[in-house]
Image: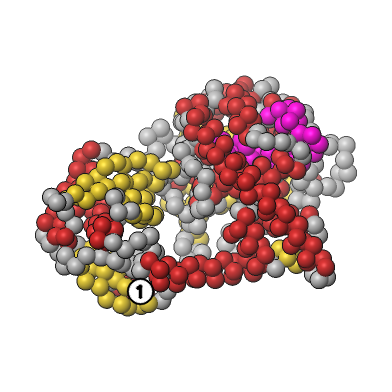
């Protein structure tokens, strides 16, 4: 059975069980800022798991693209991935444990043909938050799973969620496939994960984790299940790793043809990371230094680093990306739609990293030699920071490479060095630029003041979710980045522009006071960059219009600005927009 047939078999099975088949969602969570990516099929369904009625009904099923980086260092073994497809079915207050477990068992044994004696299951052992899941274990027994194949495990293993910091969660029962049925009978999934591959997870969502860490009961009991397509497909096809299914074999073959000294672990890392990066970039992300852009950069740079390790010369990510597009564009059409952006972003980032990697590797070797010559087995944090700050080495990469050299990287020392660097940068910026502007001229002063008016206008037109994410000002124009999930309509742009010009025509007085950060918060000041300025901050008030922490410079009256005009508004990544604007005067 191939991947395409497998997806359809799953959806057809649950459609036959009364489930509505719904589409998958974006890889970027739409309503949850606590996580960077959709990590599971249930993630987009959180409002409905909390009790909101879903328009398709109480039984749902779909295929969802997901990305997780919490176990990125394990990628390269037989079963771990960062990007994967999740097959899922849900009960929103409908069937409960008996129905979910029975359907899971039926699909595994009757539709996929897995032998029942090669299925092992785990259940939640209980703790102070929730009791031992004896009910799930008894259901498995009635289906023929013997006690010897049922293992109780703690919350770290048999509890799922919430997807973010708070929300729906609960105990789960996990299903494993025994890849070595002739192995010792006393081995179990908890101690031998290489033998027992997890293929499915039934989560019984009856709890709501609160912000204070406590657990309350959900208004409705839900079932959320997740089956990793790639891993189950590998078990179904009887191959020794999921990298040997048709989803990966074309990519693996191409990497092998390019590598001078192919090493299986490195080849798998490249294949996984390149595939994951392609899907992240397809969301409109551009590699960068924070949030989703940083994950894209980290994936790309790890792939390049491993490519060099196995002897791949020159640029290669674009060539591999073409293979990914061939294998998955028929299922995920957004890959083809965003082909140009994906290939351009990969090429740009690969070029940038190749330029620093050669120098950085030399510095890394010097750091290792220095540690050894001094009899140290820990690479100091300031060296980890120098590799990051000067040569573009992600700290996680330095930590990984140091481990291969028998050293431990001082990541806490890196964090302290990084924070010290930030503080020096803040102080330096305050001294040089009086607030971070590259120059202090009448033109930049007016434009800087205009960003305050623009920020508040965006919040009033679009909503309080709008937050400034950056700005850049020259003598000719201002550039303002902010959080917002969708393109602004012409009417919204007109409203923003009109509000800004109204405040200019009111000739509002611009004043400032120095106070503590806590006092500024009490005043309701927008404090997006308060860490740039230390404990004492300047708070600028523009009449009765806006209050914002800032370092200046500003005009004294808004009437000095001239006419404000928005030149362009566009996306710079998922959930991020950019406005360019100018101030026009009569002179």
Task: Say left or right for 568 vs 274.
Answer: left
Task: Say left or right for 201 vs 437.
Answer: right
Residue at the spot x=42%, y=74% of the render? 534
What kind of colouring is applied to the model shown? secondary structure
Name the secondary structure under disc 1: strand
Can I make out residue 357 in this image? Answer: yes
Image spot of residue 103 (x, y percent): 60, 33
Whether residue 265 is in magenta: the answer is: yes
Task: Say left or right for 380 vs 522.
Answer: right
Residue at the spot x=37%, y=77% of the render? 536
Q: Determine the image quadrant of residue 471.
A: bottom left
Q: Determine the image quadrant of residue 239.
A: top right
What residue is pinned by disc 1? 537
For the record, the magenta segment spans: 251-278
153 above or below 143?
A: below
Which SS does the magenta portion mostly show? helix
**Foreground pick, 406 / 393:** 393
Image spot of residue 125 (x, y percent): 67, 56
Can I make out residue 101 in this image? Answer: no
337 above or below 514?
A: above
437 above or below 430?
A: above
Q: How many marks?
A: 1
Q: Quadrant of the N terminus?
A: top right
* Residue sticking out furthest to the left: 506
Whether residue 247 is in magenta: the answer is: no
225 above or below 239?
A: below
Residue at the spot x=29%, y=58% of the render? 444
Image spot of residue 310 (x, y percent): 77, 39
Residue at the spot x=38%, y=63% of the render? 436
Image spot of residue 300 (x, y percent): 61, 42
Near mark 1 (Cα within 10 A), the count class, few <14, some 14-19 or many ≥20, is: many
């Amino acid at each position: 059975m191939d991947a395409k047939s497998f997806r359809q078999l799953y959806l057809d099975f649950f459609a036959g069980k009364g489930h509505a088949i719904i589409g998958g969602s974006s890889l970027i969570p739409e309503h949850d800022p606590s996580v960077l990516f959709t990590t599971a099929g249930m993630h987009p369904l959180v409002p409905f798991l909390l009790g909101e009625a879903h328009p398709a009904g109480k039984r749902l099923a779909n295929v969802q693209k997901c990305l997780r980086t919490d176990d990125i260092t394990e990628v390269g073994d037989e079963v771990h991935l960062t990007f994967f497809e999740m097959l899922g079915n849900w009960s929103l207050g409908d069937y409960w444990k008996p129905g979910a477990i029975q359907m899971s068992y039926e699909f595994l044994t009757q539709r996929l043909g897995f032998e029942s004696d090669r299925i092992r299951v785990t259940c939640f052992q209980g703790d102070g938050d929730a009791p031992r899941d004896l009910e799930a274990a008894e259901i498995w027994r009635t289906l023929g799973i013997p006690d010897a194949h049922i293992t109780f495990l703690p919350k770290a293993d048999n509890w799922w969620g919430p997807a973010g910091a708070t929300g729906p969660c609960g105990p789960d029962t996990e299903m494993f496939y025994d890849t070595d049925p002739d192995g010792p009978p006393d081995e179990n999934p908890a101690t031998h994960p290489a033998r027992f591959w997890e293929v499915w997870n039934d989560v019984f969502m009856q709890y709501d984790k609160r912000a204070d860490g406590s657990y309350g009961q959900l208004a409705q009991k839900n079932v959320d299940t997740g089956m990793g397509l790639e891993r189950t497909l590998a078990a179904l096809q009887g191959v020794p790793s999921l990298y040997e299914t048709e989803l990966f074999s074309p990519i693996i073959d191409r990497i092998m043809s390019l590598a001078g000294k192919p090493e299986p672990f490195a080849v798998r890392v490249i294949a996984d990371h390149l595939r994951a990066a392609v899907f992240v970039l397809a969301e409109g992300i551009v590699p960068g230094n924070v949030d989703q852009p940083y994950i894209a950069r980290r994936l790309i740079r790890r792939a390049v680093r491993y490519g060099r390790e196995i002897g791949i010369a020159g640029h290669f990510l674009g060539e591999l990306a073409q293979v990914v597009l061939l294998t998955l564009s028929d299922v995920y059409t957004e890959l083809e739609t965003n082909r140009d952006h994906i290939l351009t972003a990969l090429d740009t980032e690969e070029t940038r990293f190749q330029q620093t990697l050669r120098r950085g590797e030399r510095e890394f070797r010097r750091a290792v030699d220095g540690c050894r010559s001094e009899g140290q087995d820990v690479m100091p944090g300031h060296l980890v920071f120098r590799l990051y700050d000067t040569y573009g080495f992600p700290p996680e990469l330095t930590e990984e490479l140091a481990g291969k050299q028998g050293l431990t990287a001082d990541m806490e020392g890196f964090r302290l060095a990084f924070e010290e660097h930030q503080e020096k940068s803040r102080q330096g910026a305050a001294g040089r630029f009086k607030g971070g502007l590259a120059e202090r001229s009448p033109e930049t002063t007016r434009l800087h003041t205009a960003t305050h008016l623009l920020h508040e206008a965006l919040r009033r037109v679009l909503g309080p979710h709008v937050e400034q994410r950056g700005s850049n000002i020259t003598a000719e124009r201002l550039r303002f980045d902010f959080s917002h999930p969708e393109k602004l309509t012409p009417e919204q742009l007109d409203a923003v522009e009109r509000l800004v010009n109204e405040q200019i025509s009111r000739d509002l007085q611009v004043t400032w006071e120095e106070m503590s950060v806590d006092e500024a918060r009490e005043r309701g000041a927008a404090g997006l960059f308060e860490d740039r300025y230390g404990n004492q901050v300047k708070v600028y008030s523009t009449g009765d219009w806006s209050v914002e922490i800032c370092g200046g410079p500003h005009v004294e009256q808004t009437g000095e600005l001239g006419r404000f005009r928005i030149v362009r508004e566009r996306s710079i990544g998922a959930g991020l927009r950019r406005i360019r604007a100018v101030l026009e005067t009569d002179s």
